[in-house]
Image (cartoon, coloured by chain):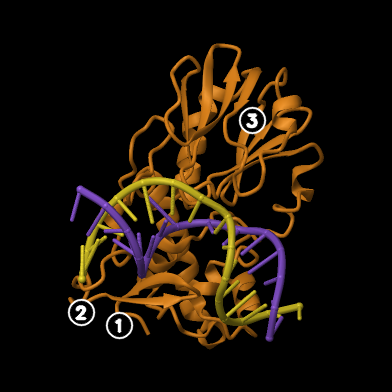
Chain colours: A orange, B yellow, C purple
Amino acid sequence: MPELPEVETTRRGIAPHVEGRQVSRVIVRQEKLRWPVSPEITTQLPGLSIKQVKRRAKYLLLETDQGTLIIHLGMSGSLRIIAASVKPEKHEHVDIIFDNGQCLRYKDPRRFGSLLWSSTAIENHKLIQHLGPEPLSDLFHIDDLYTKTKQKKTPIKSLIMDGQIVVGVGNIYASEALFQSGIHPKRAAQNISKKRLIKLVSAIKNILNQAIQQGGTTLKDFVNSEGNPGYFQQTLNVYGQKGKPCPICQTPIKQITIAQRSTFYCPQCQR
DNA sequence: CGAGCAACCTGCATGC
DNA sequence: TGCATGCAGGTTGCTC
């Protein structure tokens, strides 16, 4: 479900309810997620206070002074703030309960997400240490992308979805950014001019910023921490629009598969 | 080493 | 209505 804008929307939603709060108890109803829920989350987290909620790529990082709770929402995960006394629904696997009786409740039907504990510096964590630059930071810029692109024969869509190149660009926004920059998703990365890559970099930043402003994209079931959907799907130009007219030239949008992922583009506007 | 793809799960839409 | 099939917003870790 969630790409970077949805994760950032969730971060902003939960932060005010969580920062400065002390954890009193943790309930794990289902520990089998992408990886087993780290046992430290039950044994060490209670008694600690959440200092800050950060985000790195699509990981949410809840920092304490003894370690960091790493939450990934996978394909179908969501978090909400709710009174701990409210009976959990189906697929609500974990409760982080705070000193004020509220809890951070993790729901994830497909269980592709994860809740992990890192007691050492977070930047050394296995899942974090090899990640590329944040797309909305100055570290993601044209010279960086151009260098990484030069020798790569891989389709440009696969490249921008590769977390070592840039993090946070998922399947929806990859198609959208390529549409906005007029680049065919299958084009070999090395065959794209610097001029067009400049457009791509700003398209990625653009799309992600816009999507965050609109509270993310709700295709089926994304809801933010208050249970509300996002609105960016109303802005999607190509994703999920197979057969519909391109908003620029009216040519029907095509759907193809790249690296086992659905990909949408305009065969006229994107070369 | 990189590229390609299977795997992890449940829910839902579609078609017979 | 029931059942089989295919597809879904992510990412690791296998095999070649």
Mark 2 and 1 residues: CB-CB less than 8 Å, in contact? yes
**Crowding at mark 2 (Cα within 10 Å: few <14, some 14-19, many 20+):** some
Indicate whether A118 appears above or below C3. Answer: above
Task: Name the residue beneath numbered marker 1.
Answer: A267
Residue A231 place in picture, x, y as percent = 30, 46
Q: In this rendering, would A152 be left or right of A249?
A: right
Task: Name the residue beneath numbered marker 2.
Answer: A251
| Residue appearing at x 46%, y 79% in the figure | A196
Chain letter, disc 3 residue:
A
**Crowding at mark 3 (Cα within 10 Å: few <14, some 14-19, many 20+):** some
Residue A153 place in picture, x, y as percent = 58, 86
Task: Name the residue beneath numbered marker 3.
Answer: A52
Indicate whether A118 appears above or below A250. Answer: above
Amino acid type for the residue under numbered disc 1? Pro
Q: Quadrant of residue A138?
A: bottom right
The earlier-in-sequence mark between 3 and 2 is 3
| Residue appearing at x 57%, y 85% in the figure | A190
Residue A145 place in picture, x, y as percent = 60, 72
